[in-house]
Image (cartoon, helix red, strand yellow):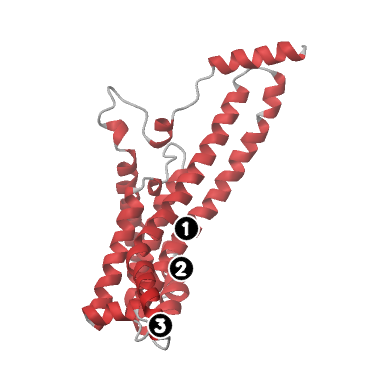
Amino acid sequence: MSLSQLSQTVMVAADEFEAPSVEHAFFFDRIGDGTVIASVKAMVLLVLGTVLIIAFFLAASRRAAILPGKLQFAGEGIYGFIRNGVAIEILGGPNGRKWAGFLCTLFVFILIQNIWGIVPVAQLPVTSHFAIPVFLAVLVWVLYMFVGIRKHGFFGFFKLMCYIPGIPVAMHALLIPIEFLSNIILRPFTLAIRLFANMFAGHMLITIAGVGTLYLWGTGTALNYALGVLPAVGSIGLVFFELLICSLQAYVFTLLTAIYLESSLADSH
């Protein structure tokens, strides 16, 4: 086959190929007119993930024993990892143990909602819908503000967050607005955007690699079958890479939450 004939074959195949839409990547396939089923994929996975988390920890703690079974060992391992490696490490002993349950719940919740993106049929990280990271970030921000104001008082908390002692007086005019913007305003935005952007980008990369594979294997030419191996292998590699990102983003979100809580509970800037 000449180069021009090969090019014409590929162009015809490209015209016949219909790539999955962005809607297909984020919603269920439509059933009927699609007004109900297709619009609730993220919510279905959100609820299902929550139910699975509750069921897991109930099963892990149902028959607690000195010599743990597999479920108890897994549950205690997750809790111990967050309690010792995040809560106590960042917040200290008393505060760390107090907040360990919340931080562990936050970590597992984000991890499961992230992992939906690589689960067959589901194939959607719930946190790639911006409303979910925003809700989590606002929740953390409200707790961060509440515990700080409860401990230090309203004005004491804002002084702690915005006033840096031991610097020239003239510098306060510059640094107080910067500290206020950084510590009070931007923290929920950075939490939400970091989680959303990473999960959205990872989901789209896997989708693009999969679509590229379908396109090349759908053209029917030997060359494109061979070339299609590259995005196919790449998509498998991206799935494992995405698993790492899912875990890392859940950990980073939890770690930053602990850092923010520690800054609210600290005695000095």
Residues packed near mark 1 inside 10 Å, few (<14), some (14 to 19) or many (20 plus)? many
Q: Position of residue 224 (x, y in %)?
A: 68, 23
Q: Position of residue 40 (x, y in %)?
A: 29, 38
Q: Secondary structure at mark 3?
A: loop
Point out which mark residue 46 bears: none
Residue ID for mark 1: 249
Q: Quadrant of the C terminus?
A: bottom left
156 over 212 or under it: above or below:
below
Contact? badges 3 and 2 (CB < 8 Å) = no
On the picture, is 259 further left or further right than 55? right
Q: Secondary structure at mark 2?
A: helix
Point out which mark residue 92 bears: 3
Q: Residue 97: in sight, yes or no?
A: no
Point out which mark residue 77 bears: 2
Q: Quadrant of the N terminus?
A: top right
Kind of residue indicated by mark 3 = Gly
